[in-house]
Image (cartoon, coloured by chain):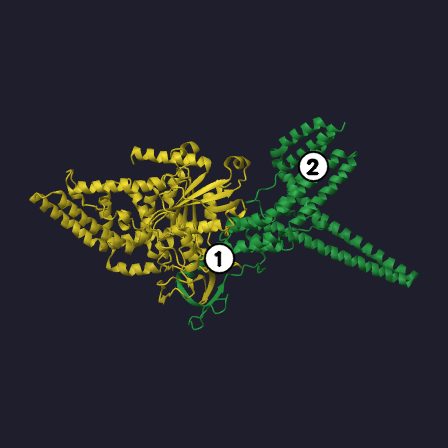
Amino acid sequence: MGLFEEARIAAANLSDFASDLTEPSLRIGVTGLARAGKTIFISSSLHNMIHGGRLPRFEAHSNGRIGSADISPQPDSLIPRFRYEDHIADLTQKRIWPVSTSRTSQVRLGLKYQSTKSIKQTLSGGRLALDLVDYPGEWLLDLTLMELDYRGWSARSFEQAAKPNYGDHAIDWLAFAVSLTAELEAATQTGTNEEPATESLARQAAHHFTDYLLRAKKARGAYALLTPGRFLMPGDLKDSPALTFAPLPDHLYSKDRKSLWAMMEKRFEAYKTSIILPFYRDHFARLDRQVVLIDLLAALNEGPETLAELEETMGEILKAFRPGKRFWLRNLVSRRIDKILFAATKADHLHHTSHDRLEAILQRLVERAALRAEAAGAEISCMAIAAVRATQEATLQMDGEDLPSLVGIPMKGESLGEDEFDGKTEFALFPGDLPKDPDSVFKAVDSEFEGPWTTNEGDLTKEVESVSEPQNSIHDPLCFVKFRPPELDKTAEGMPLSLPHIRLDRALDFLLGDSLT
Amino acid sequence: MTSSPSNSNKTRQSTKARKPRAVKLDRSSKKHAAPTPDEQTNAQLSMAPSTAWQEDQDPIHSLNNDQQSPDLTLKKGWSLAPIFWSAFTGLFLLAFGVWLDDLIRTLFTRFEWLGWTGIALLGLAASSLLIFLLREGLALRRLAKLDHLRKQAEHLYEQGNKKSATRFANQMLTLYAQQPSLFKARQSLKSDLPHLFDADAILAQTEQVLISQIDAAANHRVHQAAKRVALVTALSPRALFDILVVLIETIRMVRAIAQSYGNRPGFIAMLKLSGHIAGHLAITGGMAAGETLLQQIVGHGLAARLSAKLGEGLLNGILTARIGLATIALCRPMPFKHAPAPTLGAVIKALRDQSDQQEGTDNRQP
């Protein structure tokens, strides 16, 4: 990142500081890959705070120190407002989950509170503006490109496409990449290395590459480190040069300014400066607090490879943040994130007796990122939460076993074993046990990677045996099913009560507690 | 998870066979869901595991089983003293019995109605003694229970799960079910309990919502007693009068505090509690001295320079407050963890304010 960009960020922070003098504000970044539950987290937090929901462990709220919480006018007139009302209507009336986010939006919550400290009471006037930003999770992946140059990114993309999980989807594109070499050679021989020819080649390459990205994304979910993210969700930038490039094989590298490589490189850099940097500058460089939402259960559903991939992706993304202790003088020009909450979302798909294990797996997953942040002086916490609780807990007695299970209405199209769910009938579900040892979920990957190298005839039977061994608990079947939003209890006047949740109050207390003391 | 290793082994083995599965529910009645009857697997469902506190096992017993520290003071070995005292008491009781018997006989020889009156009075005395002993026994049990509850809470903070913590919270609710002023706090705690999932969250909620209200009342009582003692000492003409007032006021305060924490002490329980308080003060005295001795000396010095009597009152008040705070620490069924513990400093400050006020009035009067 250039000095100029740093200066722009500093200027933005300085103006933030100036506006903070009149009304203190706290920017909370709600980060997460696609389908991690960002929109629901924001909606449920807002709804519970505005309507005086049940947040017993959110100290300022439960002690009645927050006098009012209302949505304030939008501070940035160019960013769309988060459609809180629509999302809440979807959740409470239609009982469907809000649709996936396709662009950034922001909401400001104005809090009036009374501090417990007399100094703060006189100084700050008891107001706090809370800024929450929602954005598509795909864009987040782009942050990993900031430190890469075109050559490095090309290498990474090809490396990824060579992985067994992606090979099937990449065949078409890889074939094109090979043919591209021949075509370029033909072009240089005939001497038609002109702009129109390279342009059409570039468009074809981008088309094949985008095709591969879309297919891989569809198959691998949101965990895959498929970059650039804007290719998957182009919006009004579709077909612009900044979105018309593709990785090239390394042997095409040339310093010729007219070559295809140079053109791609230029566009890659344009993508970085005109798409990633503004996104980073306007959202991430100004954050005070950070919530990292991770849909761990879906990754567990997919299996150990996905989990390993998720770990890598999260590690790469978290490198883009600036953790550090809060210090007002430095805050003038460069904000640091002083608290990071790692939250495994959708904890309501699990019985509470397994929440500890989910937290342990989460801790193991973010270990490295957490260490780095803690070394920089930021505070870290890991929690299993559910911003909206869609299930109730029950014990299912079946075949002489007591199964800690969940009662709710599974979404239409979900299935478990032979059962297909229609989205209307209520079911009691036992999703399986999470492994006690969080490492076992990750270890399984290594053993499976070793698999192909050591395969002999005798090993097949061995493998079957090892599956039945208790150490290999990852092979315990797990099946987490998505549920419909809950039916809400109504008050006597017919108003819906607050959205039920799991540990949302603790999450809010961790994020906001010290600002509201 | 509190299960022992062998137990966890067993669950581990059983988890191997636990496959994910689903059972269709039939919500024919409004609230109670049940599996549809045509299900081949005779599955049964119990919703929302009952959170009501059941005395299925003695929590005290199960708690103390593994962590009974060897109490060296109990192992005294053989001694003649108990034999002597039991024999002596036995003799005394026999003599008392003979005397009663003689008395009744003598009464009968005088007039028959006098004898019957004697017997009636004796019966009345005996039955009231019995009831007294019974109540004392109950009070002692309550005192012991508070102690064990505190230990249990500490244990739960370290290794509790939702179930055990909820059980503990329900125990607290039943303990304070009789106090009308806590009705709202009880209601709000009851409605929040099903929405909390961590042991420490449940305990913290219990402490902050329910116990801290009692804390406030108890703390107020300590302040009141300390102020009263300080005032009386400062004004009273005779030392004997001081001592009497301090004694009575202290006893009343201790009783009130114990009562608000759910332990209505009887006579013997009161004696025992006093013993505990003395012990507690002896242990914490060092720490408290380190913390507040400076304040006390400064306070005394300042006050004494102005008026010896006022300073004396201040000191007596501080002593009373210390006893009160020790009582709170002993009677509170949960350790101070999420609610602030009342401090001696606050009481001293209140006392100083009062004495300053008095001083002001004293100065103005002449």
* Residue on which the image places disc 1: A496
Q: Dividing the image into 4 quarters, which one contains the N terminus of chain A? A: top left
Task: Name the image quarter holding residue B132.
Answer: bottom right
In the image, A298 versus A38, the foreground residue is: A38
Which chain is disc 1 placed on?
A
In the image, A358 versus B33, the foreground residue is: B33
| Res A387 visible | yes
Residue B96, above or below B72: below
Give the amino acid at mark 2: Gly
* Residue on which the image places disc 2: B317
Chain A shade: yellow
In the image, A464 versus A222, the foreground residue is: A222
Give the amino acid at mark 1: Pro
The chain whose colour is green is B
Which chain is disc 2 placed on?
B
Secondary structure category for the residue under label 1: loop
In the rendered image, residue B36, in percent from the top left (x then y), is placed at 44, 70
Task: Name the image quarter holding residue A11.
Answer: top left
